[in-house]
Image: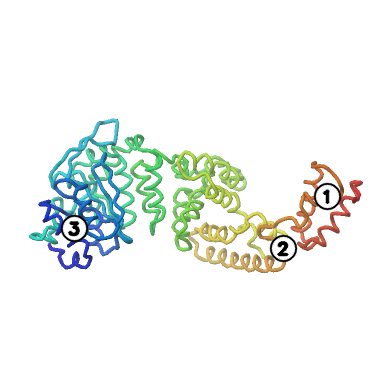
Amino acid sequence: MNFREKLEALPIFKQVGKIADEMGLETYVVGGYVRDLILGRPCKDLDFVCVGSGIALATKVSESFGKHVPLSVFKNFGTAMIKLDDYELEFVGARKESYRLDSRKPIVEDGTLQEDQERRDFTINAMAICLNESRFGELIDPFDGLKDIKRKIIKTPTDPNVTFSDDPLRMMRAIRFATQLNFDIDADTFDGLMQNAERLSIISGERIIEELNKIILSKTPSYGFKLLFASKLLHQFFPEMVELQGVDSVGDKSHKDNFYHTLQVLDNITVFTDDLWLRWAAIMHDIAKPATKRFNQKVGWTFHGHEDKGARMTPAIFRRLKLPMDERMKYVQKLVRLHLRPIALVSDKVTDSAIRRLLFDAGDDVDDLMKLCRADVTSKNNNKVQKYLANFDKVEQKILEVEEKDHVRNFQPPVSGEEIMSIFGIEPSRIIGELKEEIKEAILEGQIQNNKEEALQLLYRLAEKRGLKSK
């Protein structure tokens, strides 16, 4: 198969090929770009392999543009990178690799194109297209990657046990590619995943979470998590999620499988958002159910307080998984803590006070909270689902009405602590916090309007009861 016509659509390939011919270097575009070219997917990362010095080739290519083009050289790795508009061009010499058992850092030596293709992770990433003029556009596919693309299969080019033992991160990549491309994993390759799952322990948390987040951002992330679970990879780094799986029964009373429920919520929320952290909130929303599971003879299985327990678990899980400990973690923690609140409001008798409190606690994240709650409706009874969603419509309408009237989203007390101290000539003390809290409660209960005039009137009445007098 020849890809001359497709490569000619991007002039850089002819340019690299011409320079490679002048330098006498056998040169190819390889890996992800070739895969995505065949799949018809856009790709801005161009990987070039030459039989010789990739750094020397990159230097000549960079000089050929006649303008300043950023060139980064990584001598220790024998690679160089050029940034050209939206594209990243990486150059490397063909190489072969060998590994020690206790490290994923290879011993690298110069090699042939065949040896370079053998070290690739999967057959669909081991294809190369020649850029030299005499063979421009010719596909080099020693492991039938093209066939595996047509079959929609993820498969290692050599023995999967060697591939995964050498570099265990490839196991996460196998599942990531299967999820992103909606491919199956070859049976022998999947067996290699299961046999080598514990080897993931030598991979840094940062590298694992980078792959996991790509799975989470895919169109159907549940597929990836099912593969992670079945291969036992998930057990290596996210045991709390593994513990969600399973159903306990006492007599005729059972609870739902919270692992598969969580995956359904995650898939549901992808309809509403591409935001990684809202998707993480879906993953974490029931994470404390195993820790809070109890059986009550009258009502069956309960998970009382799992929302608060889950919020308390969130920082430790984020820290261990090498996820950010900043506002993104706090956002997920907040949604986990509040995810049952709107469900409690799905009645015609919902009060303005309850809505005000929800707005006060959720702030600007109330819309995301409602998305999470809608995604959390996973009953197999479609009539029940539609009823819940219709009730959420009413809650959202009520939120709009109360917000327009009372302005309590991101509520700030109309009277500050400094003003209270100034008005009554008192030093910082507990009484100031008590006065502010009572004013806040009065506003949330609808006893006074959320404005300074009514807040000050209430403040004077409350202060008088405590024997405080204004200066």
Mark carried by residue 352: 2
Identify the residue at horizontal 77%, vertical 46% (top origin): 433
- Which image quadrant is residue 193 in? top left
Q: Which colour scheme appears in the figure? A: rainbow
Q: Choose the circle earlier in sequence order: 1 or 2.
A: 2
Q: Identify the element where label 2 is drawn.
A: helix
Identify the residue at horizontal 89%, vertical 46% (top origin): 466
Q: Identify the element where label 3 is drawn.
A: helix
Q: In 3D space, how far apart are the residues under numbered discs 1 and 2 (Cα atoms)?
A: 33 Å
Left or right of residue 75: residue 463? right
Q: Which residue is mark 3?
A: 16
Q: Residue 119 placed where, x, y %?
A: 20, 43
Left or right of residue 240: residue 117? left
Q: In 3D space, how far apart are the residues under numbered discs 2 and 3 (Cα atoms)?
A: 67 Å
Q: Choose the circle earlier in sequence order: 2 or 3.
A: 3
Q: Residue 275 placed where, x, y %?
A: 47, 57
In the image, 57 versus 315, the foreground residue is 57
| Front position among marks 2 and 3 | 3
Identify the residue at horizontal 66%, vertical 67% (top origin): 398
- Mark 1 neighbour class, 10 Å CA radius: few under 14, some 14 to 19, many 20 or more: few
Disc 2 residue type (three-letter): Asp
Callout 2 touching callout 3 (CB < 8 Å) = no
Callout 3 touching callout 1 (CB < 8 Å) = no
In the image, 111 versus 199, the foreground residue is 111
Q: Which residue is mark 1?
A: 422
Q: Does residue 345 sit above or below 111 in this rendering?
A: below
Callout 1 touching callout 2 (CB < 8 Å) = no
Q: In 3D space, how far apart are the residues under numbered discs 3 and 1 (Cα atoms)?
A: 74 Å
Q: Choose the circle earlier in sequence order: 3 or 1.
A: 3
Disc 3 residue type (three-letter): Val
| Front position among marks 1 and 2 | 1
